[in-house]
Image (cartoon, coloured by chain):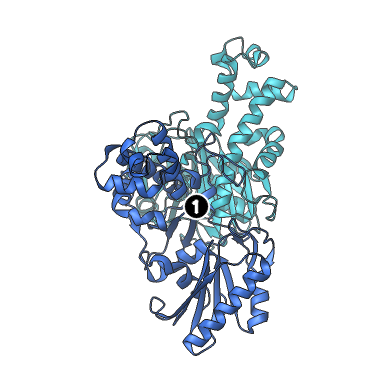
Chain colours: A cyan, B blue
């Protein structure tokens, strides 16, 4: 029995074919650019499923992870990287087109499911998995299964407001956690430090223009021991920890898993986040320590998790 | 079959005896002052259970709600109104003393359980119940049962930091939600407005001293149409809504129930909180509306919920 997991990103759709009993072993892998529009997206998903059928030699049930708000019926209501798509019943339309079971969920939920079942949170009953990329996605595992919420929209932790006077967010609010603690948050902290003259060495790395300073310049300089760059990393770690502490106070997870592109800098961030978290979570000195660990599954986590949206028999769970 | 529910507050312990099949009908009720110290607390709980036995004519299994962090074994780790009590195994010690089953949980969880089973959230699969008193307590119902968390400490939403530069909290952090959106938050907003000269009419109500302004003065003046007082209420409603939106983004509840002393001003607050919430929750215009309603069970909610910590046979759930 084979399942296909399709992970829709802002620039590409990654598809894997896996045996759900051993989903970290990728039997086939395909990727195509993310098209625009509803018809384009559905066509690309069907195309990718067909290619995986050919590669795997069998038609697998299909799980799809998409960046956006997905309800219990697999309808994508809106997504930040999918302009113009509103209220698209992906699960029903794709199941009709392919003639097989299809399950659809939010991409961060797929990440979380994969890390909880076969990744860094394996064995944990209650886990919080947070993905730090351009924005922030979160998936919450409670009592062993995904928290979907009443409408299916749970886990939108990136839009938790952590500073009411903070930077504006495309969502219309200010000070959303993902404006402060994500990859774009790091860029913003770095530019602020550059203009304030606190990281002249990093600005030099970026060719001398404060506006050209990126997260990679900061992490490179921090690894080389730049005090200014390390202060920016400290600041980022505090913002990450503030949001994690808020979530831990509410959810009390058994483990917190950090994934996404930003956690490529786990060597710089992980210990700092742990320290900043320990003094921010409520009763940190009295409670069992909540381990904070890096994700284990890498860039395929979302696709593997999408394949796991289907139960062992291939039906949507 | 009778259950006793005991609700430990900062000043009194309220006990009720109920039939768990019809727990809103209080068969007997007793209250005693909250004593200090571990021995005092255990003695008071045993005494109250004995009095309820006498009044109800039968020895009921005992559920206890306490303000503080309670783990899965019914150990109270720490509580803001119970100085000097640390790591007290209330469930085991009280069960030994009384010779019957005892269940112990956080008081806000008991409130939430009561509202979810027989109150304003009756029938909801996923509900968020927030109690606004001097501080803020929250209980989260997911898939029909209480979210306890890995250590048992879930629901500490009062210490979600919503403004990193906000007022200091006794917990050691700044800008905890309960410093801004609770009864004491209202007092603080009112005093700030008083010193700023924005509510001279309210200050007059309080005898002319800005320091003497209390929440009751603001609500009285607001009901009489004072513009300044209504602005303070608007500000409070925004702080309440900010925290509720953060929680709703993460949990996606089917209903939000507001209880506690502050919600005695539901006539002033409820509509304002709904309006402020609608523009703050993510995708408010696309998602099913999340109803925000006042609690139904009043000051006995915590004791009734404590009685419901036991299953129908009287065993801790």
Q: Is residue A104 visible?
A: yes
Q: Quadrant of residue B65?
A: bottom right
Q: Chain of mark 1?
A: B
Q: Residue furthest right?
A: A225
Q: Residue furthest front?
A: B207
User: Who is closer to the viewer here, A152 or B212?
Assistant: B212
> Which residue is drawn at the image coordinates 40% and 43% (left, top)?
B213
Q: Quadrant of residue B42?
A: bottom right
Q: Quadrant of residue A312?
A: bottom right
User: Who is closer to the viewer here, B211 or B284?
Assistant: B211
Q: In the picture shown, does residue B18 fall above or below B148?
A: below
Category of crowding for the residue at label 1, using alpha-carbon neighbours closer than 10 angstroms: few (below 14), some (14–19), many (at least 20): many
Considering the numbered disc 1 on the image, is that residue within a helix, a strand or a loop? Answer: loop
Residue A193 point in image, percent of width and height: 59, 19
Q: Residue furthest left?
A: B225
User: The N terminus of chain A is located in which quarter?
Assistant: bottom right
Q: Is residue B96 left or right of residue A146?
A: right
User: Who is closer to the viewer here, A316 or A136?
Assistant: A136
Q: Is residue A110 visible?
A: no
In this figure, which residue is indicated by the disc labeled 1?
Answer: B135
Residue B203 point in image, percent of width and height: 36, 39
Residue B254 point in image, percent of width and height: 38, 58
How many labels, in total? Answer: 1
Q: Is residue A28 left or right of residue B118?
A: right
Q: In the picture shown, does residue B6 fall above or below A225?
A: below
User: Who is closer to the viewer here, B165 or A173?
Assistant: B165
Residue B303 point in image, percent of width and height: 48, 71
């Amino acid at each position: 029995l084979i399942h296909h997991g399709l992970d829709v990103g802002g620039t590409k759709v990654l598809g894997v074919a896996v045996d759900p009993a051993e989903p970290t072993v990728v039997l086939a892998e395909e990727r195509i650019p993310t098209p625009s529009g509803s018809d384009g997206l559905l066509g690309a998903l069907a195309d990718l499923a067909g290619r995986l059928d050919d590669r795997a030699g069998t038609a697998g049930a299909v799980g799809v992870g998409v960046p956006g708000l997905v309800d219990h019926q697999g309808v994508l209501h809106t997504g930040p990287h999918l302009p113009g798509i509103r209220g698209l019943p992906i699960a029903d339309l794709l199941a009709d087109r392919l003639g097989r079971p299809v399950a659809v969920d939010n991409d961060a939920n797929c990440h979380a499911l994969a890390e909880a079942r076969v990744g860094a949170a394996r064995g944990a009953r209650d886990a919080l998995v947070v993905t730090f990329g351009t924005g922030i996605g979160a998936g919450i595992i409670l009592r062993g299964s995904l928290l979907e919420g009443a409408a299916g929209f749970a886990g939108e932790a990136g839009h938790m407001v952590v500073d009411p006077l903070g930077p504006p967010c495309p969502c219309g609010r200010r000070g959303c956690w993902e404006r402060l603690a994500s990859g774009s948050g790091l860029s913003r902290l770095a530019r602020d430090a550059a203009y304030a003259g606190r990281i002249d060495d990093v600005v030099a790395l970026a060719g001398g223009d404060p506006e050209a300073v990126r997260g990679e310049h900061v992490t490179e300089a921090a690894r080389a021991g730049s005090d200014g760059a390390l202060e920016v990393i400290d600041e980022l770690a505090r913002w990450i920890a503030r949001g994690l502490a808020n979530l831990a106070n509410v959810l009390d997870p058994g483990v917190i898993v950090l994934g996404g592109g930003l956690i490529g800098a786990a060597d710089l961030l992980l210990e700092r986040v742990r320290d900043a978290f320990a003094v921010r979570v409520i009763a940190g000195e009295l409670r069992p320590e909540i381990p904070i660990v890096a994700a284990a599954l890498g860039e395929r986590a979302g696709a593997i998790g999408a394949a796991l949206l289907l139960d062992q028999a291939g039906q949507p769970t």
